Image (spheres, rainbow, N blue to C red):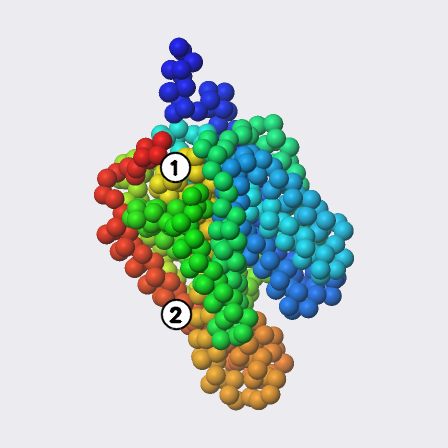
Amino acid sequence: MDSNIAHTDFDGIDPTIYKRRWFILTTLCLALLGVMLANSSINLALPLMSVDLGLSQLEQTWIVNIYSLLVASLLFLAGACGDRYGRKLALQIGSLAFAASAFYAGFLAHSAIELLIARGIMGLGSALVMPTTLSIVNNIFPTKERVRAIAIWSAITGIGMMLGGVMGGILMEYINWNSIFYLSAAIAAVSFVINQVIAPESRDDKGLAVDWIGGVFAAVGIFGLVYGITEAPSKGILDGTVLAGLLIGLASLAVFVLWERRSASPLLDMNLFHNRAFSVSSLTLTLAFLAMSAIFFTISQLQQLILGMSPLTASLLMLPIMIPFPVLAPVIPNIVEKIGNRYTIITGLALITVSFLVISAWTIDTTYLGMLPAMLVMITGVCLAMTPSTNILMASVPKNRSGMGSAMNDTTRELGCSLGVALFGAILSAVYVSNITEVSGRFSGSIKTSLETSLATALNTAVSLGPDAGTVAEAAQVAWMHAFSIASLVAAGIVFVTTVIALMALPRQKQSENDKHE
């Protein structure tokens, strides 16, 4: 009798699991942090990696992209497999695959193809880890504590994006490029051992089958779409591979939607989009990660090419920008309780909008201390928008299909990151070339081409121009900052429109329908 009462008090959660829920969350966050670091640190390793292994530009691109492409495209299948066969099982298989492939990449890979395959398997492992960690969190915390748990989980995803660059910079400065993979392997191995002992197993109690056919359509669709979005800024949208990726991706996703409407156990229940809270929270998550990835895609360039910082200094000075994540994670549930999900999300989006507007006014004379307030405001906005949006999305999905909600949550993040880099990359490239034309037009041949290629190549070329070096370098920096300002204004406009949509569409009650599917 007492056992039944206790069971009810814990929202049906086993009392033993309930007692160690916060420790379980810690071990799950460790697994999540490991896969997040792996993607955000690889760019810093490329130069030395390319020299040691003789990588071509195409090989470099695929070694970077294959990870994120496979993660994004396999999330729905991975989430469904976790629901069907066991979320802990999926987490552990993913962690083991990730650790083994990272170990191979760091210690044994001696060619581009070996490194490419290792990165691909790391992506597969990450696709299993990401949705299952949130699925388990959704099942071990009662409703009243779930917002706080999700806030901590969300903070780790944000910290992981930035910490990877910081750790990468330190490791590259003092060890070598292989050490990035050593770190990934070590974190994954430790989390595997701890979660084997601590993490509970759970699965869909209805035993719904995995929609493998829908999974193929989703994988092909998302792979093609993310590939096209990622490559469009550098290759142009009319490039054959980019256009093919976008068209195949969109066609596959259209078929996926049609198939899911008829499937008995859909990977993504299309009826969820009739729920305005679910739809708007998905859009909010996409835009929050668009903002964060866009600004961090460019901020390191700004620090090094405009402010003259070394890569290591630039990496270390990203640490203060992370402060809102650990500070706000514990208090966001209190904010949500007082003003509700709707106004918390709207406030977050408004702060992101304002920060982009402030950032658009930066010039080549802006200092790091002058940049810091706007960056802190932006990350505060991301925190406020991200946590309640994730909670609404997960609350909209039945608990037995937590993998589906987790996969949708992670997919919006991956698409947001890809869109953010693509958006800023395309605008920076187009506006920079337009602005530098007047200066580059005074030269011809390879010098003209170098000046128009990028700010980095322009600054490198300017050194050899004698008396014109200072003038050309400053003109290139001004042209790039103007392009950066335009991109920031475009991003501000996009986030502002999302703010209006959230204001009009999100439910007005303080609490989202957390109990709807309990």
Report the residue marked by disc 1: 398
Label 2 SS = helix
- Using the rendered view, name the quadrant where residue 373 is placed: bottom left
Residue 426 vertical placement versus 259 (above, below): below
Identity of the residue drawn at 27% across and 47% down: 506
Q: Nearer the viewer, residue 97 or 350?
A: 97
Residue located beneath label 2 in the image:
486
Dot 1: what SS? loop
Q: Residue at x 76, y 57 (%)?
A: 110
Q: Residue 502, position in %: x, y?
A: 28, 51
Residue 213 in sight here: yes
Decide which of 175, 513 is in the foreground and name it: 513
Q: Nearer the viewer, residue 394 or 287?
A: 394
Residue 293: give x, y in percent of width and height: 47, 57
Residue 252 horizontal side relative to residue 459, left or right: left
Label 1 to label 2: alpha-carbon separation: 42 Å
**Residue occupying the far top of the picture:** 1
Q: Amino acid at mark 2?
A: Ile
Mark found first going from the N terminus, 1 or 2:
1
Displayed quadrant of residue 9 = top left
Quarter containing the N terminus: top left
Residue drawn at x 34%, y 58% is 495
Task: Count neighbours of disc 2 (C-alpha within 10 A) and say few if under 14, some if 14 to 19, many if 20 or more.
Answer: some
Query: What residue sits 64% from the left and 45% below the top?
Result: 98
Residue 432 rendering spot, x and y as whole percentages: 47, 75
Asked if the residue at tag 2 contacts the one at tag 1, i.e. Cβ–Cβ closer than 8 Å, the answer is: no
Q: Name the foreground residue: 252 vs 277.
A: 252
